[in-house]
Image: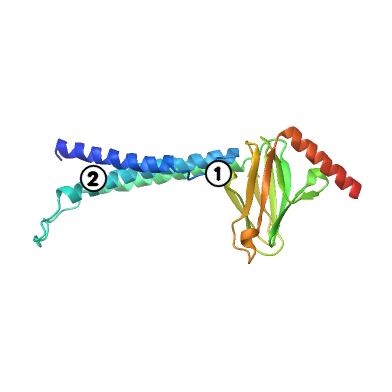
Amino acid sequence: MRRGSILTLIAIGIVAGGIATAVAVLLPWLPEPASREAGRIHFVIWFVIVICIVIFAVVAAAIIYAVTHFRAAPDDLSDGPPIHGNTKLEIAWTLIPTVLVTAIAIVSAIVLSRNDAQGKDVLHVNVTAQQFAWSFSYPDAGGASSPILRLPKDRSVLLTLHAKDVIHSFWVPEFSQKEDTVPGLTTTLHITPDRLGTYAVICTELCGLGHALMRTTAVVMTPADFDKWLKSQKQASTTKG
């Protein structure tokens, strides 16, 4: 291939990659992460996006160059010249996707392993789903329950999920994790909140007519405020008992 053609391909690829990068970066595709696990998940997403942008730039450059430089005349109905396969090229476009997919699998496995690893002083929260409401109980507070999920910042939290009727799915967009609640089964989800705030808890599994209304909030508090709230719940539970 001539040097001019190579430079043209590179220029087209840079333009196509720049447009794709602008779309990926400038549009708010992902919520601002509010947990350590979400930050790792977003890293995997961006890792894949970068690979996709590079592939898109290469493919777009090849297509645009071919369309503009090898377009047949409107009245040309002849067949093109016969082309014999290129073994080196076929090996290359087999090895490169293999390497990229393997890299994505390795990065994803590492992130999944780290997200599942629990830290010290784990807070246990029982999550119960039923048509069409969430409830949360805290074994450390004598089993006191709340319709709002309250969590301390920077503390490892293990959610143990149960369903009373049908399949539901627990999701907080800013935590970037989902977990199904299945009748008769116990599922778990590990979260380490790292940003104060109030976030929506959403059911993402169609569970009946009131599915769209099955929402509550998750409040990430300072450790001091959470301990104070937990203590008050424990006292209230003791008083009722």
Q: Position of residue 19 (x, y in %)?
A: 34, 42
Which residue does the image show at 29% across and 44% down from the upper left?
Answer: 58
Please indicate, yes or no, whether residue 241 appears anywhere in the rendered image.
no
Q: Position of residue 234 (x, y in %)?
A: 84, 43
- Disc number at residue 81? none
Q: Quadrant of the N terminus?
A: top left
**Is residue 96 left or right of 148 when viewed as pictured?**
left
Q: Image quadrant of residue 153?
A: top right
Q: Position of residue 110 (x, y in %)?
A: 52, 40
- Disc number at residue 88? 2
Q: Could you tell me how many numbered marks the image carries?
A: 2
Q: Image quadrant of residue 5?
A: top left
**Is residue 46 left or right of 166 when viewed as pictured?**
left
Q: Marks 2 and 1, Cα distance to the nearest angstrom?
A: 36 Å
191, 105: nearer the viewer = 191
Which residue does the image show at 70% across and 41% down from the upper left?
Answer: 151
Q: Identify the element where label 1 is drawn.
A: helix
- The residue carrying pointer 1 sits among few (fewer than 14), some (14 to 19) or many (20 or more) residues within 10 Å by Cα, namely some
- Which residue sits furthest bottom? 209
Q: Identify the element where label 2 is drawn.
A: helix
Please indicate, yes or no, whether residue 15 appears anywhere in the rendered image.
yes
- Disc number at residue 112? 1
Q: Position of residue 156 (x, y in %)?
A: 67, 38
Between tags 2 and 1, which lies in front?
Answer: 1
Q: Amino acid at mark 2?
A: Lys
Asked if 210 appears above or below 30 in the picture, the reply is below
84, 142: nearer the viewer = 142
Q: Amino acid at mark 1?
A: Leu
Asked if 2 appears above or below 240 in the picture, the reply is above
